[in-house]
Amino acid sequence: MITEYLDLLMFAALMGAILLGFPVSFAIAGVAIGFAYLGYAAGVMNLSLLGALGQRVFGVITNDVLIAIPLFVTMGVILERSHIAEDLLDTMGRLFGQLRGGLGISVVLVGALLAASTGIVGATVIAMGMIALPTMLRTGYDPRLASGLVCTAGTLGQIIPPSTLLIILSDVMSSAYQQAQYEQGKFSVETISVGQIFAGALIPGLTLVAIYILYLLVLGVIRPQDMPPAPTPEGRPGLTELAGAVAPPVVLIIAVLGAILSGIATPTEAASVGAVGAILMAGARQGVSRRLILAGVAALLILAVAAGVAPVRLQRSDAGMGAWTLGAVYGVLALLGMAAVLASLRKLAQRDVLPGAVTTTMTVTAMIFATILMASVFSLVFVGLGGDARVEQILQAMPGGATGALIFAMVLIFVLGFFLDFVEITVILLPLVAPVLILMGHDPVWLAILIAINLQTSFLTPPFGFSLFYLRGAAPPEISTGQIYAGVAPFIVLQVLCIAVIWLVPGLATWLPGLVF
């Protein structure tokens, strides 16, 4: 009897190993190998399935889409370590501080800007926990509300593109979409690109920001004592100061997302543009000559446009004097851009920003890729034990047909978010449920956005929400863990409300991808 349920026991054993504190990637691989041999001994597992592991590992390592992850992480870490977030928080706090709840609104808006320019949840939560949270407490904000705001605003980096969650999710959903089409007998299959997922997530992400702000405005009327106006002894920021704080991140966001959505660059190419842009912004912030930075940015922009409009191929035998002259101009532009980048890197290294950014990038990237690789072992064994067939049977047996199956899957993802990280849920569970849900008729882009917002709640749900841990480490000692947990509860409800809005109005997730792609 036990052998019939080895697949379910395998999933339970994985959760138990993670709850016991084992490193995630080792827990995934160890449970998978253990149950593979257990299934082989029981006669229900064919070990030859593991022969596909090498091909899967090679596919992950050579996946062009996933290369964008370390580049986006680099962009976010450099922006966070160069204190650009501090300037944003200070400026926006003074801009909205006189409103009742204005400081909270500024935290949400800064969280959205940092989400679109960094996408690093931990960095955003820690930065705002150290900068904005003490200010809100001094102003008289309720500690629970202030803690919940900081945690929630920091998690916007998972739904507002670009984000590592959306990149991993796009890869998984694309594979699931192709698998669903194969099962339908289609061999000329369509795929889902990162650009489509980014476009699909943009309006829902802004919708979530609008829901948060609306909640704060209503709360300011109902419970004004929880959100008093903040004193601004330095006065409201002028237009020049406001532009100086807000314009650089906004320009970077437009450059990265605009390049992807317009089709000018692939996500990996746009991520490299973002990383270089972050280095130049951080260099200017750390004291590199602004003339050199502006000249370098202008040179790189001109080079990017000109090389697309009038490409030069000097290796051709018929290249004339005009081509060589144009090539020389392009070379000068490239050298000018390189000079600005090298000067920024040198300044960042002197200020001890670069070493920490590189170390953090390598750590985060290694964690993500180790989890993805080990999840390949887990999914192979799970399929070998018949887990995929069981999941399909469960979903198809749900009352309510396709809608009932989707509700069950969303509830399961939400519950697992209390115990598992978004990467583990994405690469272990979604390859099993997503093909079945797509076969039932759900739009893959709309489905991906619903799942993305659902996965975002995993950062806020105790006991293992990462944002809760980040804030616990950065919060003042007078903030208790219970206050942090109580503070995020209303915002978890608001995220569920946002899921309901996207469910009832699918066009919020599908209109922009359909228009652009």
Image (cartoon, grey):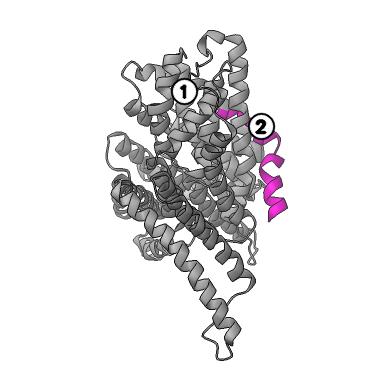
Which span is picked out in magenta? 495-517
Tell me which numbered mark, 2 or 1, is placed earlier along the sequence. 1
Q: Which residue is mark 1?
A: 148
SS category of the residue bearing label 1: helix
For the image, the number of numbered tags is 2
Q: Where does the image place residue 330, in percent across and percent down from the top left?
A: 53, 72
Q: Nearer the viewer, residue 366 or 91?
A: 91
Question: Does the CB distance between marks 2 and 1 fall below 8 Å?
Answer: no
Q: Is residue 497 magenta?
A: yes
Q: Is residue 265 visible?
A: yes
Q: Where does the image place residue 50, in percent across and percent down from the top left?
A: 36, 61
Q: Where does the image place residue 86, in percent across and percent down from the top left?
A: 43, 33
Q: Nearer the viewer, residue 381 or 471?
A: 471
Q: Is residue 128 magenta?
A: no
Identified by mark 1, the residue type is: Gly
Residue 55 falls in image quadrant: bottom left
Identified by mark 2, the residue type is: Val
Say which quadrant the N terminus sits in: top left
**Badge 1: few (under 14), some or many (20 or more) residues near its Cα, within 10 Å?**
many
